[in-house]
Image: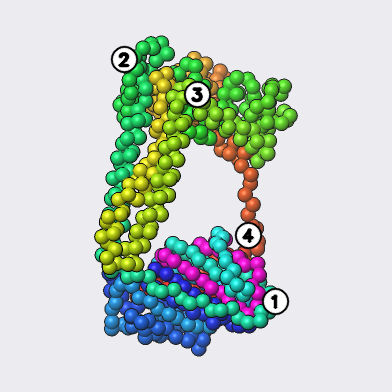
Amino acid sequence: MDSFWAQAVLEGNTAAITEVIDYDFASQSRHGIFREVPGLVEQDFAYATSATAPDTWSLAPLESLAPLGDQDGTAIRVGDADVTISGQHRYQLGYSLNTLVVGDVVSWNGLGAGWLVMVASTELHLLASVALEDPVCFQGGNWSQNACVVTEVAPGHLMVKVNDLGWGRGITVTATRGEALSALPTLPVPPQPPASDAAWLVWVAPGVVLLGILLAAAATGGLVGWLGREKIYVGGIVDAAHAEATGGEQRRIDHQELAEMVTLTFAPPKGLAAHQGGLLLEESLRSEHKSAWILEQALASEIEIRSEDDHRVLVDLKPDRSAGPLKSMFLGQGELSLKEYSKSFSTGWGELSRELSDWLKNSDLWSARAGGRILWARLFGWVGTLYGVLAILYLVQDVVFSAVGSWEGFMSSFHWPALALGVGLALMMRADELRVRTAEGTGLWLQAEGFRRFLAESEAKHVEQAADQGRLREYTAWAVALGETTRWTQSMEAAVLEPTVYRDDLLWAQHGAWLMSDVSTASSPPVSSSSSDDFDFGGGFSGGGGSFGGSVGGGGGGGGGGDW
């Protein structure tokens, strides 16, 4: 459906409703549309008209309308069974309902969630000769409480506009009746029908624009990739991976060639912490890196991690430490449970994010000029994208609404906006590739990626070897940081280790599998939700919410429709 426009004019407890439906049948041969309205009795239906399609209408009782029981209403069928139509047609329907008001609450399912098609544009007007106070709007599926914007056009006149609603999505407008007004607000006028999609320019113009954007984006992306090649020491794989031991001549290498140089590494890089290794590979901060940092604090005997029932508890082993993330997390507490949200842990978690982000930004493993290049690329990307979008929208509008003579102007003008948009999008999406590693950084990347692949392919014997070497806990921290927790945990479960010897190591290693979930709980405030005890199923095909008007489908009217 191209557009759905409706107004409900309230007089007392009765609403006179007008619907203007622009329905696009495309190339399908159909007879017309049908409409299902809860609460509508046949004698209150006034008319159905169309200037371009057969508008004979018939009414029938509506049965089993509501999802949870029968509902009174009327089914309206508009069209001629002996005539088929296609393309776009406008229908106008008029009827009255007395189901929109309960007490002083007015709630209108302006667009029911029972429509079987997507709705590109929806505009609803609720009018009354009294003030409409505390208006709210909900959009979505049955019983959804997702908010939408309500505009007060004038006292007693509310308007809602929503674009691109999927099938099975509706809109409910709710308000409270206030003081009487001197007169009914001025009635709005339905918009003109959308331009016909039959004009071939409407289809060709977007395709040409899209092609230009893709070509510009591809060329820019290739240039960014070339400029973002990594630095590496000249020599073999060993020389490149252990750059700190060689020095000497450097060259640039693209990411595909670099990936082909990686070989399995059975130990993590020296001089690099696990969380730093994760940052080096991803070049962005993730929760895995912060969780690995927590594990490393336990390795360094700064804290102890204990399991209690189904959650972890952090124990502060050095409460006299100086300021930092751990200091803020514990805030003088000896123990910190991760079972539920903790304000102090959340504060320290935020400090840790800033600390690791600063390391990522200032580490000498990347070129010092990388930050400036990325900033300028994003700036030009935003400017180009904004200019391109605005200019293309203007040009496409020119083609759609001024078809005669506009194609030539479009063809002579679109290339600059398309070029700007393609370049802008590519710069925004790929700016981070300009973060070039130094030769030392590339060498450590090769080692870290090699170790990640080792963890990804690890077997039980590798866990047993790590345990024999006393490195099981260290490897677990690296598995968390490099995103290989699942595989490493599976390998641990398959390993044959003497429980009495490795009991503490095995228990500690299990923390890695559960820590990310626990820290997410402890650092995120709980989301409040309404009690299900207040839930009832208000009238209308589109369902009901917590109370009359409390969600999509909680008011009067609504229903749905489609074509036949």
Q: Which of labels 4 and 1 is toward the front?
A: 1
Name the element at disc 3.
Answer: loop
Q: Which of pointers 4 and 1 lies earlier in the amino acid sequence? A: 1
In-front residue for pair 149/540? 149
Residue type marked 3 = Ser
Asked whether the viewer can see residue 157, the reply is yes
> On the rendered structure, is 564 left or right of 533?
left
Q: Give the CA distance from mark 4 to mark 1.
A: 33 Å
Residue type marked 1 = Glu
Residue 108 in the magenta stretch? The answer is no
Q: Give the CA distance from mark 4 to mark 3.
A: 51 Å
Kindly indicate the quadrant of the structure image that contains residue 186. bottom right
In-front residue for pair 313/74? 74
Region of the chain picked out in magenta, as a range: 118-145
Q: Is there CB contact under 8 Å for labels 1 and 2?
A: no
Q: Residue at x 36, y 20 (%)?
A: 232
Kindly indicate the quadrant of the structure image that contains residue 504. top right
Residue 140 in the magenta stretch? The answer is yes
Expressed as whole percent of the image width and height from the top left, the position of residue 281 reads 43, 28
Name the element at disc 1.
Answer: strand
Expressed as whole percent of the image width and height from the top left, the position of residue 115 reads 44, 69
Q: Which numbered disc covers residue 179?
A: 1
Binning the other alpha carbons within 10 Å of mark 3 as few (below 14), some (14 to 19) or many (20 upward) gives: some
Q: Which of pointers 2 and 4 lies earlier in the amino acid sequence? A: 2
